[in-house]
Image (spheres, rainbow, N blue to C red):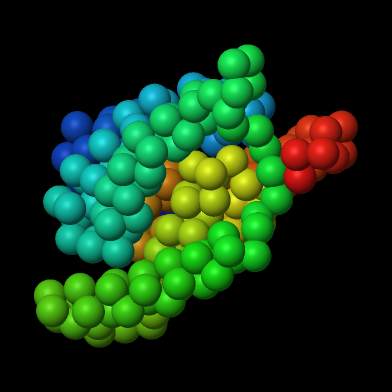
Amino acid sequence: MSEIFDFFFSQYKTYETIDVVLEIIAVIFGFLSVWFSKQNKIWVFPTGMISTSIFVYLLLKWELLGDMMINGYYFIMSVYGWYIWTRKVDETHVTPISKTTNKEKRISIFIFLATLIFVYIVYKTFDKWTSWVAYADTITTAIFFVGMWLMAKRKIENWLFWIVGDLISVPLYLYKGFTFTSFQYFGFTFIAIFGYLAWKKNLDKNPSIS
């Protein structure tokens, strides 16, 4: 049992206690954010902003630039998404769940490719393009950038990007030594699957808005 514990948590012996506590708090609020998103509740954004703010600080301290940029982008898109989700499309209705349009698909492709280029430039500039982890970080950053943009637009396809990105992030964060964050993404994967099913059920009940 101790070998298993050491495998997952031995790296935390070298971390400051405050950083471990902050990571756990960020994970808790991250779970709350994804859960509220599954429930189609506006609380997805304030809880997500708390989580991402903490992660931006920690990831900057740990010099994980790609991950830091993801969370910084999450924070900005949370502000945008908060506005979109509460914006009334008429006198009584706010922005509904819907499917991605062809124009939004083209924008998604642009965001993905632009993110790949941007993250690559940042990693090369700071001499961080040194291992396979940089490649994985670049791909997951691009996936999550698209997923967050689609979630802010209340598009059902956002969940597909979260599922793929979460699956990649589970072993990636474990390899980096951030076990609690790895567990977070493991939980995110299941919530994202159920989130997609819940949003699809909502769309099936309201086919006119899809």
Q: Which residue is drawn at 43% across and 30% down?
A: 82
Judge from the rendering whether residue 52 lies leftward or rightward of residue 30; answer left or right: left
Numbered circles on residues, count:
0
Q: Which residue is drawn at 18% across and 60% down?
A: 63
Q: Residue at x 43, y 58 (%)?
A: 145
Say whether residue 95 is visible: yes
Residue 95, percent from left and from top: 59, 32
Residue nearest the viewer, comparing 137 with 24: 137
Residue 1, percent from left and from top: 54, 46
Residue nearest the viewer, comparing 20 with 144: 144
Say whether residue 174 is visible: no
Residue extending farthest to the top is 92
Judge from the rendering whether residue 88 lies leftward or rightward of residue 197; answer left or right: left
Residue nearest the viewer, comparing 108 with 170: 108
Residue extending farthest to the front is 91
> What is the quadrant of residue 118 in the picture?
bottom left
Q: Quadrant of the C terminus?
A: top right
Determine whether 9 is above or below 42 in the image: below
Residue nearest the viewer, comparing 161 with 59: 161
Judge from the rendering whether residue 134 lies leftward or rightward of residue 32; answer left or right: left
> What is the quadrant of residue 26 in the picture?
top left
Q: Which residue is drawn at 48% across and 50% down?
A: 148
> What is the quadrant of residue 164 in the picture?
bottom right
Residue 168, percent from left and from top: 54, 65
Residue 191, percent from left and from top: 65, 40
